Image (spheres, rainbow, N blue to C red):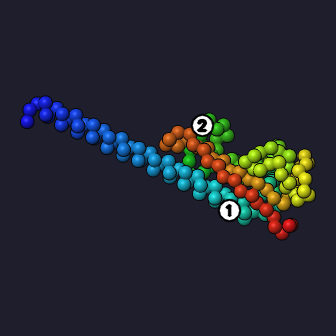
Amino acid sequence: MTLVEVMVALVIMTVSVYLLTSTITATIAHTRGKQERATAVDAVMNLFEHMRSEPFEELFTLYNIDDSDDPSGPGSAPGANFAVPGLDPDPADGDGFVGEIILPSQGPQLREDVTQTKLGMPRDLNGDLRADARDHANDYIVLPVTVRLRWRGAAGSRKFEMSTMFANITKL
């Protein structure tokens, strides 16, 4: 073998090792991203199941942003923000939590006239066949909810959202 052949073989091996290493690194990052997303989906589904186990009439006061109306006293309810084990909060999200529960509200009021397309709002929440500007925290029969997760993962800032609709069928 000549020196030129040895050099060509070394270049080919170097490129091959680089490509193999890059593929392995990308696969590891992709696997981490899939694990993070699975953690996010599980967290949202578990939250929805937990919300289903709560008394329907208290859902809004348990998960809104106002802690002064919590059923067992101020600061006793879970509130609108929550941590997710296994996911780190995105530093750009100032509240320090991964999860956020979004309800059709303006401050502490449950409102039918709020424009939130992801929640299908404005919408009649109390069954009187009109969407008005009053507070319906005490008479709603449907409650649209979106849960948004924002975290800092292996691939940078990530976001996941899921929505559902809770209904009190005993009042229907």
Vertical relation: 132 (above or below) 10? below
Vertical relation: 136 (above or below) 18? below
Q: Element under label 1?
A: helix
- In this view, the residue in front, 121 or 94, is 121
* Residue that carries the numbered disc 2 in the rendered image: 91
- Give the residue at x 81% y 64%: 168
- Give the residue at x 90% y 56%: 129
* Residue that carries the numbered disc 1 in the rendered image: 49
Give the mark count: 2
Q: CA distance from mark 2 to mark 1?
A: 28 Å
Query: In the rendered structure, which disc, 2 or 1, sits on the residue that comes first in sequence?
Result: 1
Residue 110 shows in the view:
no
Question: Nearer the viewer's eye, disc 2 or disc 1?
Answer: 1
Q: Residue furthest bottom?
A: 170
**Crowdedness near tag 1: few (<14), some (14–19) or many (≥20) residues, C-alpha within 10 Å:** few
Residue 94 place in picture, x, y as percent: 66, 37
The amino acid type of the residue labelled 2 equals: Pro
Q: Quadrant of the C terminus?
A: bottom right
Q: Is residue 158 left or right of residue 11?
A: right
Residue 141 shows in the view:
yes
Q: Element under label 2?
A: loop
